[in-house]
Image (cartoon, grey):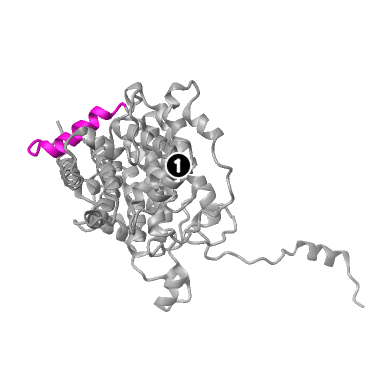
């Protein structure tokens, strides 16, 4: 038997235990000498701590190993796949002259945004990082709705989601930057896409963040009286929640089609994330709204934010998207909100209107519900904060569409005066002491009686 000498024992103690090395780990973990789990597009450490999560010769989430095999190389970092950098941009590159270093995989998403969104939204997206992250997150969501494919833009979606969170966190350190419309747009888009995907815990966190931003704003942006759109939302929620159960079931099962906006109102009235009553009366409380919401927040549940869950049904997802807007607008409270944020909301409302117009005329969809929704949509067009004549003209076009629809359904229902119009509104949601009645009456009269003056004053 071989004797074990003290020298041999010391040599064995000095031997390092075997462990699997992470050769393809991200640059952040390598710099910190941390074992990277190599998750794509964001490793666990970078996801939790906000690291850049850069991989060799690729942007975050680029699978360099796969690219290496395609190029015939044994070393993953020798990929020959072309990357687009800002310095390589052609004169037609929309990011030329800006400070944005957009990853290659995000550029195809931006091209889709350019094709789908209006020119003003694209221009504003390039004016501020908050608007840019918001536009790309919204575009990824709309792609998933239209195609059912959640994987195609999975990498840029997670990338801009993380970048939006980091951007907002940085902005909150400076009160002047925190209250910028771009910061509000970034927070709003995070809440909207998360609610569309069913991540309620995350939505409540973003809504509390928005409430905190509102507390930093000056008195001029914290009016005591809400705008017409916010008052309509609160009135509808109160009215719907007072309906008997069988009436609510009839509303949600209206014939063969439905509007996502109606389902959204039922959600916020009957199964709210936060009580709209609490949100609406927050300015009468001495306690900051963010603290009130923190006490009423849902209990957090463990989840992996690095995983993009399969998309729920499009109707369910769109209803969650629209419902989140109701919370956002009541928290913002302002009579007018940035048209960049409002445009995405109005787009979904109009989609509902166009989809149900023919069934409404054929008697296959409730005409009273349709009348209520087009009146609500007209209120939404009045809530836009326009910064130039072009934005004002664009919103006038949308408002004219709604006024035409109000006129159409008023003829279908043979509505001759405002009292008759109120009786139709009352079938779904109306309060006799509603303090926005005169404003709604003016909208209806403009739609039915005045055809040549449909523009913002």
* Corner quadrant of residue 428: top left
User: Which residue is depicted at the point 63% across and 67% down?
Assistant: 20
Q: Farthest residue toward the left?
A: 452
Numbered marks: total: 1
Asked whether, in this view, residue 121 is left or right of residue 59, the answer is: left
In the rendered image, the vertical position of residue 32 relative to residue 399, given as above or below? below
Q: Dot 1: within a 10 Å radius of its alpha carbon, few (fewer than 14), some, or many (20 or more) residues?
A: few
In screen coordinates, is 205 left or right of 19?
left
Q: Nearer the viewer, residue 24 or 216?
A: 216
What is the magenta segment's predominant secondary structure?
Answer: helix
Q: Quick check: is 305 in the magenta stretch?
A: no
Tell me where residue 108 appears, x and y as whole percent: 30, 61
The image position of residue 283, as x and y in percent, is: 42, 24
Query: Which image quadrant for residue 298?
Result: top right
Give the answer, above or below, for where 402 lies relative to 436.
below
Q: Nearer the viewer, residue 53 or 214?
A: 214
Residue 28 visible at all? yes
Which residue is located at x 42 percent, y 79 percent?
72
Q: Verify whether residue 452 appears in magenta.
A: yes
Residue 93 position in % (x across, y down):
23, 56
Q: Is residue 385 visible?
A: no
Which segment did they paint magenta?
Answer: 435-454
* Label 1: which secondary element: loop
The N terminus appears in which quarter of the rendering? bottom right
Q: Report which quarter residue 371 is drawn in.
A: top left
State the residue at coordinates (43%, 26%): 281
Q: Which residue is mark 1?
A: 244
């Amino acid at each position: 038997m071989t004797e074990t000498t003290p020298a041999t024992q010391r040599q064995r103690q000095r031997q390092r235990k075997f462990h699997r090395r992470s050769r393809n780990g991200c640059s952040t973990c390598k710099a910190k000498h941390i074992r990277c789990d190599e998750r794509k597009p964001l490793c666990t450490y970078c996801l939790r701590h906000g690291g850049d999560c850069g991989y060799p010769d690729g942007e975050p989430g680029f699978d360099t190993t796969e690219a290496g095999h395609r190029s015939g190389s044994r070393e993953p970092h020798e990929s020959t796949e072309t990357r687009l950098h800002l310095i390589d941009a052609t004169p037609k590159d929309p990011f030329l002259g800006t400070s944005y270093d957009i990853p290659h995989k995000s550029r195809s998403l931006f091209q889709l945004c350019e094709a789908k969104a209006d020119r003003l939204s694209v221009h504003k997206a390039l004016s501020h990082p908050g608007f840019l992250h918001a536009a790309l997150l919204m575009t990824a969501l709309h792609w998933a709705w239209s195609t059912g494919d959640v994987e195609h833009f999975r990498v840029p979606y997670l990338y801009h989601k993380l970048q939006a969170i980091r951007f907002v966190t940085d902005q909150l350190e400076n009160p002047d930057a925190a209250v910028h419309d771009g910061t509000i747009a970034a927070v709003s888009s995070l809440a909207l896409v998360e609610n569309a995907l069913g991540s309620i815990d995350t939505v409540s966190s973003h809504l509390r963040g928005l409430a905190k931003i509102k507390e930093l704003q000056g008195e001029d942006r914290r009016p005591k009286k809400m705008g017409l759109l916010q008052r309509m939302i609160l009135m509808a929620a109160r009215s719907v929640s007072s309906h008997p159960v069988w009436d609510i079931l009839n509303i949600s099962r209206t014939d063969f089609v439905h509007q996502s906006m109606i389902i959204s109102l039922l959600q916020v009235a009957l199964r709210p994330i936060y009580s709209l009553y609490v949100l609406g009366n927050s300015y009468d409380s001495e306690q900051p709204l963010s603290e009130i919401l923190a006490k009423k927040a849902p209990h957090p549940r463990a989840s992996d934010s690095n995983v993009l869950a399969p998309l729920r049904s499009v109707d369910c997802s769109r209803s969650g998207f629209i419902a989140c807007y109701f919370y956002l607008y009541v928290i913002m409270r302002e009579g007018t909100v940035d048209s960049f944020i409002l445009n995405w909301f109005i787009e979904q409302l109009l989609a509902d209107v166009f989809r149900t117009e023919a069934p409404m005329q054929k008697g296959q969809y409730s005409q009273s519900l349709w009348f209520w929704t087009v009146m609500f949509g007209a209120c939404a067009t009045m809530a836009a904060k326009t910064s130039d004549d072009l934005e004002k003209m664009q919103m006038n076009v949308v408002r004219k569409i709604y006024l035409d629809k109000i006129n159409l359904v008023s003829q279908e229902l043979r509505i001759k005066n405002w009292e008759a119009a109120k009786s139709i509104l009352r079938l779904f949601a109306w309060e006799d002491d509603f303090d926005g009645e005169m404003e709604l009456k003016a909208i209806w009269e403009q739609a039915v009686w005045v055809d040549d003056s449909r523009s913002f004053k």
